[in-house]
Amino acid sequence: MSAGQVLISRDEIRARTLALAQEVTLALPPGPVHAVVILKSAIFFGVDLIRALGREASLGFLFASSYGDSAESAGAVALSADALGRVTGQNVLLIDDILDTGNTLAAAAETLRALRPASLRTCVLLDKPSRRQVPFEADHVGFPIEDVFVVGYGMDFGGRFRTLPDIRVYRQEKK
Ligand code: XMP
């Protein structure tokens, strides 16, 4: 088992993240932002994006786990909101690595909206529009990609490949 060819290089990730941060900052209402990162796989992107925002930011986390095998999103999403921080009345930026079927972000956005933020925007690094099962679009997207399973830059397969600096297409070697 190994990670395959580079789909998006570390330089492309860096450049796009800086541009996204500017785009997000312009779209946010003035003042501080409460940035909510979906763990675990959005942690690298979240940190890089938040650091590049020209805003004072408080941090919150949602831990998402979906049931099923690790390369196939299975629909049901369990969200743990223990480290969400203060959402009510705040301008909230919800950050995830990939928008795939839409189940995770739809559930996360619903959880946040129930807490009545002053505003809510969503930002994802990658979007696989062809995979959508629920109607959800992010306000800000880094790269639309085809239906391929990717690893690296925080994204894993069975806990592996998270720390690779580039985003690679995952491939399973034939035995
Ligand atoms: P949904 O389907 O809920 O999925 O929109 C969002 C979450 O599924 C994970 N995901 C992936 N993880 N490579 C990964 O390492 C992929 O290609 C991939 N596609 C979806 C990811 O955690 C994302 O937040």
Image (tube, helix red, strand yellow):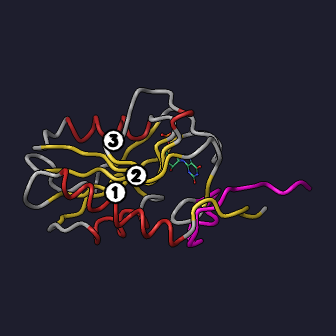
The residue pinned by badge 3 equals 108
x and y, in percent, of residue 78 in the image: 43, 41
Quadrant position of residue 20: bottom left
**Which residues lie in the magenta part?**
156-175
Question: Horizontally, is 106 left or right of 126 in the view?
Answer: left
Q: Are marks 2 and 1 in contact (CB under 8 Å)?
A: yes
In this rendering, is residue 94 above or below 159? above
x and y, in percent, of residue 37 in the image: 34, 57
Mark number for residue 37? 1
Q: Under tag 2, what secondary structure?
A: strand
Q: Under tag 1, what secondary structure?
A: strand
Residue visible at 35% across and 68% down? 47
Amino acid at the residue labelled 1: Val
Q: Nearer the viewer, residue 82 or 16?
A: 16
Q: Are marks 3 and 2 in contact (CB under 8 Å)?
A: yes
**Within 10 Å of the Cα at label 1, are there few (<14), some (14-19), or many (20+) other Cα atoms?**
many
x and y, in percent, of residue 18 in the image: 35, 67
x and y, in percent, of residue 126 in the image: 48, 50
CB at disc 2 and ligand 1 closer than 8 Å = yes
